[in-house]
Amino acid sequence: MRPQMNSLARLRAILKWLARAAGRNRRSFRFMGNNMHYTTVASLFMLDIAAAGILLLIMGVIVVLPLSSDPLRAIPRTRMRIWPLEDNERRLLRILSPWLSPMTWVVVALALWRRVSLGLVALATGVVAAGFLTSGVASGNRATPWRWLPRFPRPLNHLIRKNLREMMSTLDFCCGALIAVATLAWRVAGMLPAAAFFPLTAVAMLTISTCALTLFGLDGAGGMTRYRLMPLRGWQILLAKDAAYMTMALVLAIPLSIGGACAGALVALAFGHNASVRNLRPQLRWRFQTGPSLGDALVQVLLMVAAGAAVVYSSPLFLLVCVAAWAGSLWWFGREIDRTWH
C-alpha cells in the first residue's frame, strides 16, 4: 500500500507543477500591443465587422498550435530521465498530461456538442494533434528548416541569418505565412481577382509590422552585450536586422504584390527604427510581438498602407521615396547606436 501511495504522491506533485507551468504558458499569449490587435479594434470602431473577424480568425487559428503543445515539454529530457519513476508511472504521466492543455478540453466539448458536425470535430482534432506532435519534434535535437537559410553577403551573413531565424519564430510571421499560403492556393485555383492583390498584401505586411517596432526584442541581454563588443558600426547592426525583415516580407509577398510589399516594409522599418533603438522591449519566441504604444502602431500602419497604395495605384517611382526614407532612418539611428551603445 505504501509504495502505491508514494507513486500517487509523486505523480500528483509532477502534475501539479505541470499545471502551474501550463498556466504560465497560457498567460504568455498576449494580443494587446500587437498591430493586428490594434487594427482589429479600430475595424470594430469603424463598424467593419468583416475585417475585424478575418484578423481575429487568423490570430485564433495561429495561436491554436502553440496552445496545443505537449505540457511535458516543460520538463527537460535529462531531468525526466533521472527522476525515480517506474515505467507504469511514466506511462500514466504520458496519458494524463495532455489533459492539462485547454485545447484538449475544447476538442472534447466539440465532440460532445451534438450540433457540431463530425468533420469539424475531426478538423479540430487534427489541428490540436499537429500542435502536440510538432512541439515534440521541435524539442528534439533534430535539424530544423531554420538552419537551411540562404547565405547573405559578408560580413553580415551570420548576423542576418540569426535575425531571420528569430523573426520567423514569431506568431506574427506565422499569421503572414497563413495568408501567403492561402493566397497562393487561391491564385493557382484562379479564384483570386487582381483587385484583391494589394489589400491582401497590406494585411500580410500588417501581420509582421510589429516586428519592425521591436527589432532587438528577441536578442535578450546577452545579445545586446554581444552587439556592443562586435567590430561593426551601428548602421551595419541595424542593416542586418532590416535585411532579415525585408527577406521575410518578400517571402510573404511572393503570391501578392511585390512592389506594394517592398514599399510597406521599407516604410515600416524607417518608422520602426526609432522605437527599436530607443525603446528596447524584451519579446518571446513563438508569441505575438508587442509594440511600444498605440500611437506608434497606428502611425506605422497608416504610413505602410499609404506607401504601398502609392506604388501600386499611382507610380512605381514612389518606391524610390520609400528607399530614401529608409536609408535616411538607417543612417540616423545607426549613428545613435554608435553614440549610445558603444
Image (spheres, helix red, strand yellow):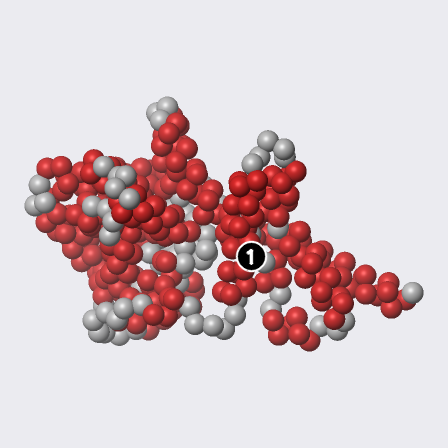
Question: Which residue is the site of mark 1?
Answer: 132
Rendered residue at 55%/45% (across/down)? 122
Which quadrant of the rendered structure holds the N terminus? bottom right
Compare residues 107 and 231 and report the one nearer the observer.
107
Mark 1 crowd level (few <14, some 14–19, many ≥20, 10 Å Cα): many
Residue 143, percent across and down? 43, 72
The answer to whether residue 278 shows anywhere in this view is no
Q: In this view, does 295 lie above or below 84?
A: above
Image quarter for residue 302? top left
Rendered residue at 39%/57% (across/down)? 217
Compare residues 328 and 124 and report the one nearer the observer.
124
Compare residues 80 and 228 and report the one nearer the observer.
80
Quick one: which residue is furthest to the right in this view?
1
Residue 152, percent across and down? 23, 69
**Secondary structure beneath label 1:** helix
Residue 170, percent across and down? 41, 55
Q: What residue type is labelled 1?
A: Phe
